[in-house]
């Protein structure tokens, strides 16, 4: 026997799977050979079609964490998979650079508390510079994370939402809205954050996590009916400060209202609430003296109590409709008193009620939501701080009924967490409510893959509120509207060129489309010759990023790629990017068309305990820190495999390093096993193809079965990817690798590979041909998920054995099922076989007979059809069961019944198959079993010492066995030498008999010593 053994050091794959080393090597390989760039160029020239895509730009205001990583991994999966299918995808990066999230981050870094301080201490010019510096710093982190994760996104072609080019194209959306009369100035009630000092859109108000439980006053108070000294309206509020801006009371026209006698007073409230409210107020003695319909209260005047404190209110009181009762259907008669006070300056419905009646709106607030001089006594007080003052004033006037506290859900700012205040303000609105039918129709045509997020998105869209797009901030795309200071004419300027042409003074060279520079540009009114100033607003940052489909492409690219084929973002983007993309696209095109054909909303990622990741809990896992020690492949596989993309995922580092790691390690070792054996036999994939093996009749049932299973796996896997059921797809692939190949197929063929007999070489080559095909195909399927390991194995095994293969695994074509390999009859037979083998294992377990110990006989009892299947695979059954002979019968032979009862045979049965094992082991069986036990220890030692499986050892020494064992073992020495791949095995009674490096192993309750020399 001339050993063709190769030293381990010459072998390119380490003995164990070390993902971090693999990933570093592959990263270097990709960089050195410019694989990503080449792949893009290649697919641009050679494709079966184009699939549009646009990056949902991450905001550069923080470092990427695992939640971001999960989304990016899904994007990369989609990109690599579609690229392998032959499509060209413009997988180009993009960065969200402006807006409130960035401003707040920079404010924090600069150590200023609010906008006023910012403008006073820092100034707009420096602030803008700081914003740019900050986004560049975070950008570095994001690119690093993408690189570590193996995201093949093109960073060179990234778009940046703050560049002039981008902003100019964003303006085109607004221009279209302007032309269609959908962009208008308005005085409306908007949600306003006192902290950020800007208004928010209604989408932002509903943002994930913005509603929090807060404590507010719960105040019952009364307003006296004018000219009736004893009659009062009983009212409830949680925002006492709004009494300062109160202008009307509202009742429900159809509800029954009661006058309740309490002491000397009559309180008016809705009848159905009398009992619970009196109970809450602790009023025991009361009687309903009269009931009237809400409608009959309309027009009643009440004495507004703060006329002395707020002179402006005394003035408003002269208006014929102010401080009177109105009827409104929105009044809820199931809570509080059914009488609500209306403050049109502080509530959406209140505002609408005032507008439709021509009642003026009173909103005496400045940008910090402090009362202005119009609020008299309350001037300079922050609105929410006025709550206690208002209560105190009511008390002084004898109008306070009860002041308590209430804990309830209240919307806060999604960025700064301040309690929001509703304020009537002058803003700019996109009147998307007017095109809502088109928007909803467009959204309904999109594929969402899962019902729940689809419903959530559609029901949000159906609200169809106007979109407040103006922000009173600094770092954003400016609103390009100039207003004449003389005649009020407005003009919309849609490009930098036009702006420079019209500017009264030519702007300096460093001029850019940002505050403060753009505010310095004045233009001349074409109508009256007056000076026009820019409206000082910037645009909602969601408008900025929502402009990406048009703004990030050229006209030509836009025509080619939009509507894009697929997008995926977090579920929170239903109110964010998915919404603004849709609204802007419908405005731009005028069509009921979304800019995306499919949108996968991902569930959010939480910590291992299912808690939201947050700075305050300190449980945020940053990608770059994580991947210093953890494998990107394992992480990617874990994220995609653990749960459905729409599920909330609990990210658990311990869990990640267990099963997911083992699955990838199995894949690694299978490939390594193949490589070691194939190289040993000089397998040549160009020559020893599957066709070659097939035509030579060299393929056997296990191979044919494996090849058939492979086709099914390819088909199901791809179908699940199409449906975005990544976890189901991977469960199937995992099962194929771990169960089908590793646990079942390899044991069926392993023995055939043990020999180096030239006579059976062709059969071994046929097995390699099978493994080559199956394992390589599996790698291709895995590539979009674990690109590092796949590239490493591809280079070190497949490309090495066949240098004509493409330069990188990413250039390979996506596998398609080959029906000629499908054999469902064979698959069914194997199903029966595997059921039977697992019965053998459980019978063995019952009788405490190790699987390694050969047994003499088994009897299988089942239907004729099953028996036929088993007979056709008898050799494999005996091999896997480790039994010498099998008998097949439709009924248990009568003569065996007694032996089964007495325990001479052990039984296991399920699903119509019963297996009986003869438990008796004669000396021959005992000897062989012992040999296998000892051989197993030798194999472990081989592995420990780093021998390649194909390497042939000189001598194996075994010592420590007793006389009896040695006698039993003797007849099997040659077989054992074969099994452990050694020229000879020598038995010794004691280790001291020979000079060797002994290794001690437990063998049942004894010890055995093994040495290799
Ligand atoms: Zn805020
Ligand atoms: Zn004018």
Image (tube, rainbow, N blue to C red):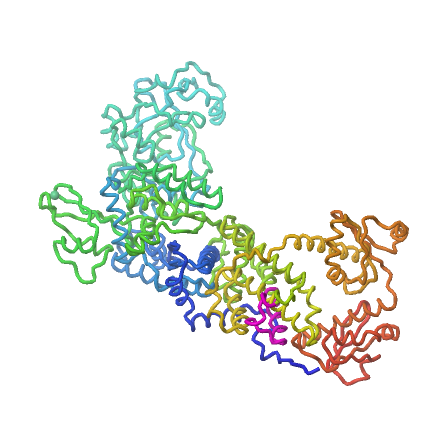
- Looking at the rendering, the stretch of residues picked out in magenta corresponds to 666-692
The residue sitting at 54% across, 63% down in the picture is 779
Q: Is residue 157 above or below residue 430?
A: below
What is the x, y in percent for residue 287? Answer: 46, 16
Can residue 209 be seen here? The reply is: no
Residue 679 versus residue 711 in the image, above or below: below
Q: Tell me residue 727's x, y (percent).
A: 55, 53
For ligand 2, the image quadrant comes to top left
In the picture, measured across the screen, residue 53 lies left or right of residue 318, that is right
Residue at image point 51% right, 62% down: 783
Residue in the picture at 15% in, 51% down: 522
User: Is residue 600 visible from the viewing direction of this image?
Assistant: yes
Location of residue 334 (image quadrant): top left
> On screen, 263 above or below 903?
above
**What residue lies at 76% left-to-right and 80% top-to-bottom?**
984
Q: Is residue 78 left or right of residue 111?
A: right
Which residue is farthest front? 695
Asked if residue 671 is among those painted magenta in the image, a careful observer would answer yes
**Tag count in the figure?**
0
Is 632 in front, or is 317?
A: 632
Check the image and name the residue furthest to the bottom: 995
Q: Nearer the viewer, residue 837 or 986?
A: 837
Does the magenta-highlighted stretch encompass residue 439? no
Residue 1000 point in image, percent of width and height: 76, 75
Quadrant of the drawing holding the C terminus: bottom right
Identify the main secondary structure in magenta.
Answer: helix
Q: Position of residue 155 (x, y in %)?
A: 37, 63
Q: Quadrant of the N terminus?
A: bottom right
Nearest the viewer among 108 and 782 is 782
């Amino acid at each position: 026997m001339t050993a063709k053994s190769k030293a381990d050091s010459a072998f390119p794959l380490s003995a164990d799977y070390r993902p971090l080393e693999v990933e570093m090597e592959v990263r270097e390989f990709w960089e050195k050979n410019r694989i990503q760039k080449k792949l893009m160029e290649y697919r641009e020239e050679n494709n079966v079609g184009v699939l549009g895509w646009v990056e949902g730009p991450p905001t550069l205001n923080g470092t990427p964490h695992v939640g971001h990583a999960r989304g990016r991994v899904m994007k990369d999966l989609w990109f690599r998979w579609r690229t392998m299918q032959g499509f060209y995808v413009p997988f180009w990066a993009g960065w969200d650079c402006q807006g409130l999230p960035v401003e707040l981050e920079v404010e924090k870094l600069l150590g200023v508390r609010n906008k006023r301080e910012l403008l006073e201490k820092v100034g707009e010019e420096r602030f803008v510079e700081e914003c740019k510096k900050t986004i560049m710093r975070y950008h570095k982190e994001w690119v690093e994370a993408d690189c570590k994760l193996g995201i093949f996104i093109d960073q060179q072609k990234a778009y940046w939402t703050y560049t002039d080019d981008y902003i100019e194209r964003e303006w085109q959306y607004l221009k279209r809205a302007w032309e269609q009369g959908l962009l208008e100035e308005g005085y409306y009630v908007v949600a306003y954050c006192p902290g950020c000092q800007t208004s928010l859109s209604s989408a932002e108000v509903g943002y994930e996590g913005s509603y929090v439980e807060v404590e507010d006053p719960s105040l019952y108070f009364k307003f006296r009916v004018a000219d009736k000294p004893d009659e009062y309206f009983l009212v409830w509020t949680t925002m006492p400060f709004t009494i300062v801006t109160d202008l009307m009371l509202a009742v429900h026209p159809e509800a029954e209202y009661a006058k309740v006698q309490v002491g000397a007073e009559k309180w008016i409230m809705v009848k159905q609430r009398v009992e619970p409210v009196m109970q809450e107020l602790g009023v025991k003695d009361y009687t309903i003296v009269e009931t009237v319909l809400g409608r009959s209260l309309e027009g009643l005047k009440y004495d507004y109590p703060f006329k002395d404190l707020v002179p402006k209110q005394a003035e408003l009181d002269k208006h014929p409709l102010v401080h009177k009762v109105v009827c409104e259907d929105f009044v809820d008669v199931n809570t509080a008193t059914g009488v609500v006070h209306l403050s049109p300056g502080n509530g959406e419905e209140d505002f609408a009620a005032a507008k439709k009646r021509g009642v003026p709106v009173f909103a005496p607030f400045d940008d910090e939501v402090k009362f202005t001089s119009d609020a008299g006594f309350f001037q300079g007080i922050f609105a929410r701080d006025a709550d206690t003052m208002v209560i105190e004033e009511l008390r002084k006037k004898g109008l306070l009924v009860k002041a308590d506290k209430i804990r309830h859900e209240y919307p806060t700012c999604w960025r700064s967490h301040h309690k929001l205040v509703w304020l009537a303000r002058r803003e700019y609105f996109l009147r998307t409510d007017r095109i809502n039918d088109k928007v909803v129709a467009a959204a309904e045509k999109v594929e969402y893959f899962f019902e729940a997020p689809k419903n959530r998105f559609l029901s949000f869209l159906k609200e169809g509120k106007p979109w407040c797009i103006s922000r009173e901030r600094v770092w954003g795309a400016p609103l390009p509207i100039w207003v004449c200071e003389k005649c009020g004419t407005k003009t919309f300027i849609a490009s930098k060129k036009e702006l420079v042409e019209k500017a009264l003074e030519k702007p300096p060279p460093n001029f850019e489309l940002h505050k403060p520079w753009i505010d310095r540009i004045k233009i001349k009114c074409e109508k009256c010759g007056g000076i026009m100033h820019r409206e000082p607003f910037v645009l909602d940052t969601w408008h900025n990023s929502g402009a990406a489909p048009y703004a990030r492409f050229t006209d030509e690219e836009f025509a080619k790629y939009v509507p894009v084929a697929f997008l995926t973002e977090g579920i929170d983007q239903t109110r964010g990017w998915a919404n603004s993309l849709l609204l802007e696209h419908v405005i731009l095109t005028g069509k009921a068309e979304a800019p995306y054909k499919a949108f996968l909303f991902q569930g959010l990622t939480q910590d291992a305990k299912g808690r939201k990741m947050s700075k305050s809990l300190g449980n945020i896992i940053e990608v770059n820190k994580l991947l210093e020690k953890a494998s990107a492949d394992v992480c990617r596989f874990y994220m995609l495999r653990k749960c459905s993309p729409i599920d909330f995922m609990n990210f658990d580092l311990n869990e990640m390093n267990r099963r997911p790691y083992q699955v990838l390690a199995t894949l690694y070792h299978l490939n390594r096993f193949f490589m070691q054996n194939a190289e040993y036999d000089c397998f040549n994939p160009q020559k020893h193809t599957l066709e070659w093996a097939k035509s030579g009749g060299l393929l056997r049932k296990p191979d044919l079965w494996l090849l058939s299973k492979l086709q099914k796996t390819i088909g199901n896997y791809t179908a699940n990817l199409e449906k975005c059921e990544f976890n189901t797809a991977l469960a199937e692939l995992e099962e194929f690798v771990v169960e089908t190949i590793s646990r079942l197929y390899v044991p069926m063929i392993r023995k055939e590979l043990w020999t180096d007999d030239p006579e059976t070489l062709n059969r071994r080559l046929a097995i390699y041909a099978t493994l080559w095909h199956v394992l390589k195909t599996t790698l291709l399927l895995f590539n979009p998920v674990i690109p590092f390991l796949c590239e490493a194995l591809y280079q070190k095994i497949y490309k090495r054995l066949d240098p004509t293969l493409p330069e990188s695994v990413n250039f390979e074509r996506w596998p398609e099922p080959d029906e000629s390999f499908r054999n469902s009859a064979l698959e069914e037979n194997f199903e029966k076989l595997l059921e039977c083998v697992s019965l053998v294992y459980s019978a063995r377990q019952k009788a405490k007979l190790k699987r390694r110990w050969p047994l003499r006989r088994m009897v299988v009892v089942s239907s004729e059809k099953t028996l036929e299947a088993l007979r056709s695979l008898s050799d494999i059954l005996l091999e896997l069961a480790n039994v010498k002979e099998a008998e097949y019968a439709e009924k248990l032979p009568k003569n065996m019944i007694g032996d089964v009862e007495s325990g001479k045979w052990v039984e296991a049965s399920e699903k119509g198959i019963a297996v009986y094992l003869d438990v008796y082991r004669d000396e021959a069986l005992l000897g062989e079993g012992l040999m296998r036990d000892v051989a197993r220890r030798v194999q472990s030692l081989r592995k420990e010492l780093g021998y390649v499986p194909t390497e042939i050892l000189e001598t194996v020494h075994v010592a420590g066995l007793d006389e009896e064992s040695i006698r039993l073992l003797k007849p099997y020495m040659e077989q054992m030498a074969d099994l452990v791949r050694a020229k000879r095995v020598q038995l010794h009674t004691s280790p001291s008999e020979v000079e060797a490096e002994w290794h001690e192993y437990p063998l049942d309750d004894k010890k055995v010593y093994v040495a290799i020399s």
